[in-house]
Image (cartoon, rainbow, N blue to C red):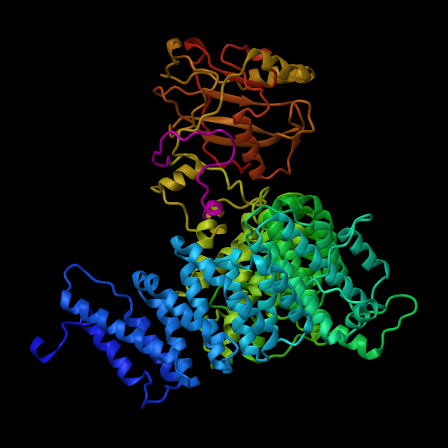
Amino acid sequence: MAGFGHVQNMYDISLKPRLLRSLMRDYLPDEKRPSPSPSKLSDVVSAIKTHGLLLESFRESDDQKQIDKWKSAIDAWVERLLLLVSSKMPDKCWAGTCLLGVTCQECSDDRFLASYSIWFQKLISQIQPPSDSHFVKVATCASLSDMFTRLGGISNVKKDGTSHAAKLIQPVLKLLTEDSSEAVWDGAVVLLCNIITFFPYSVHRHYDSAEAVIASKIMSGKCRESISKKLSHCLALLPKSRGDEDCWSLMMQKILISINVHLYNVFQGLEEETKGNEAMKWLVPPGKEPPPPLGGQTMSGEASDQAIKKSEKLIIPSVSMLVLCCCTMLTNPYPVQVTVPVHPLLALVSRVLLVDGSLSKGLSFVTVMQQEYICSELTVLHSYSLDLLIAIIKGVRSQLLPHAADVVRLLTEYFRRCAHPSLRIKVYSIMRMLLISIGVGIALYLAQAVVKNAFSDLDSVSHGHESASSKMCLKATTEALQQPRHKKRKHITAASSLEEHQNGVGSEVEVHKNKPKVPTSVQIAALQALEVLLTVGGALRSEFWRRDVDLLLITVATNACDGGWTNEAKDTFDLSHELASTWADFQLAALRALLASLLSSAHERPPYLSQGLELFRRGKQQTGTKLAEFCAHALLDLEVLIHPRALPLGDFTSGRHDAFDDNCIFPENIFSVGPKPKGQFSRVMGLDEPDPDDDLCNSWHGNGEETEAPVGVRDKQLENAEEPCEKRQTNGDSQAEKISSERSAGGQAPEEGNGRSMDDDVEMGTSSDGIMVQSERLLESGPCGYVETLNKSLLVPTGSARGDASINVTISSNISLDNEMDGNVATRAASASLLGKNNLLSSPSVDEKETGPVVFELNSDSSMDSFPDIVDADPDSD
């Protein structure tokens, strides 16, 4: 097959030179063939990058003849491009220049280092004054940008690259000042940005002229917004050419002064006259000379007034670009550490955000047309000011803490008046950023603003007026979740009305007929802010808003998901797919916020855990979507609430996992709210009845592990705990004697040689023997740490590590009983008493009469001849 010229496969090295020569033959122009169209030229570039036709990468097994053929093909390619660049015909010169830039990117390092000086001389001649073609200038700027980007990644040519870049500064600045084409301006400013980024010292000698050209271009207002953004980025990078702190600070000061001077003239009649003076005091302290103006252009008083008082249509876009320049200076890395003027920056942000277009009190010289235009442009100016606040937070980081109060005050005041959707989204993002960066300290002050505005934005989804209507809506949706799936809901709920709205059956709810619709993007931002607030500060001083927020989130999540799970596939030609994707993002944000609500409940069981589990279970079934992935992740996160690995009652340690005993009666779930009937524990959590062979369930209920409680304390601690309980000691002693335990028949006492230490515990295993514990409620109101004794009896299975020996534990008190106490409180009190949280558990050597109301008795063989009968009954029964 090789004799017919066939290649072995698609990876054969002989294929590379053939494809390259075919491209030269079919597409590259020559004396007879014209220049290819831009679409054909893009096909050539795509083929070169896809097949690596200029890489010159070889393997050891490759044939040397084929390698030489590939090198000769690349040599012919480069020679043809240099001829095209030198052509006097603009179209051929444009094609050769574009392909030479691609060659700078794709060729091997050896070829690039050997040829970039020749290529540079060929390209720089195309931007000199004799060239009149705008297409050639744009292509030349792009190719030079590719060349200096490649040079910037090679460390051993930094010096040579700096000398070559210095030759381009003057020609590029002339393109910005003398040329009238915006395409040329675009290419020139991109080239200048690349030079400053990779070879900053090449601009050092031309710093002042570059600042003047860029600043005048920004303030002229003649450029498109995209070009103005590139110019502001270039101006922000300019201090890197000197690389010292003074240069950066001076540039920032110049920009801020220029912004405040222009705002003073634009905002006349719309703000207090003292605002501009207060901002200038931060920038130029009394007694100090102001810096030269931005760009270094000083004008006479009359000319300066005319320039400043020019049309607002030119001033406001220029001010916005200068604000964007400040953002770039705060967020881009700088060679040395600099001092950020936080006070002037915050004063500028506050000055802009407090102007809403309304006329200030007193006389005003603002015309109706001026006010209309300023109001129309304030949205853009506010957006850039919020971007500046974001840049301040990112640039200053932890040093913003002394100014956090000013930021919170500004955001709270602005959020109260802000109604534009894009601006509200940015405010939500700033609050999220503050909560994440500063933490719970800022959450105490931002919580009210976040919660209030989130309720307002999510009201249309929750279908209610603040908390009252939201509770009604939640009641309906909760009943719908609790009903069997095969039954149809015959009453109208918020979820059903939302579903009708999704399907186009119904229109807006009657209550919200005249209320403006909140965009879904704003509602997503509100849910994200609530998620971060709950994660950071959901467990600290949140009692006044936490219950309403939990209610809101379960309502929004239920209503959002009851309408059906949306498809996330996007189709640019189908608007319905885009809307479905937006609603899918909203559903995901609602579920994320709901998960944060369930996981951040620190003091009690989440009130809407069962409803949330049902939503996540349904969402998990939507296989292949982001919603399904998150719901599966949420169920794993909630596993700790559904199946806690250990009871959070103290320093219990697991010993062994045995099978369930038939006589064991387990306490109800300590995480449940309110009393529940026997056997309903697992059904409340959405699970089946516990499997007797389930080791996880054994460890959960505490029956299959060797759980121990301390049996001794130091005498000094015991004496300190007994002193406030002397008045109740008599009754306690008599009651303790009445129910003191004796050894059961055939039991063995623990050997004295194996005495237990201070940390020895009472073992609770799977033995057929048991102990009767009379529980008491431990509260802080009593002198001994408890107030009242429960009229409940809890049968706790016991066992011992030493044969069949058992320990009888009696906990009693003379305080009045509370008959209304439920079984869960009794369980908590009994478990807490076993842990000895109040240091009332005595050592084995302490006499019963000396320990007061709490007695732990380890008697000798003579005192343990008998053992009280085990009462095999339900603890909650009479």
Residue 50 percent across, percent down from the top left? 31, 72
Left or right: 456, with 867 as reference point:
right
Residue 250 magenta: no
Q: Main secondary structure of the magenta part?
A: loop
Query: Could you tell me residue 173's position as x and y percent?
Result: 57, 69
Residue 644 in the magenta stretch? The answer is yes
Residue 802 found in image quarter: top left
The N terminus appears in which quarter of the rendering? bottom left
**Farthest residue in the right direction?**
362
Q: Nearer the viewer, residue 95 or 877?
A: 95
**Left-right relation of 833 to 401:** left
- Work out whether residue 820 or residue 469 is closer to the camera in this orientation and state it: 469
Say above or below: 388 vs 36: above
| Image quarter of residue 367 | bottom right
Query: 769 left or right of 878?
Result: left
Going by the picture, which residue comes out furthest to the bottom?
A: 32
Residue 773: tell me if it is visible: yes
| Residue at point 58%, 76% (across, down) | 501
- State which region is magenta: 639-661
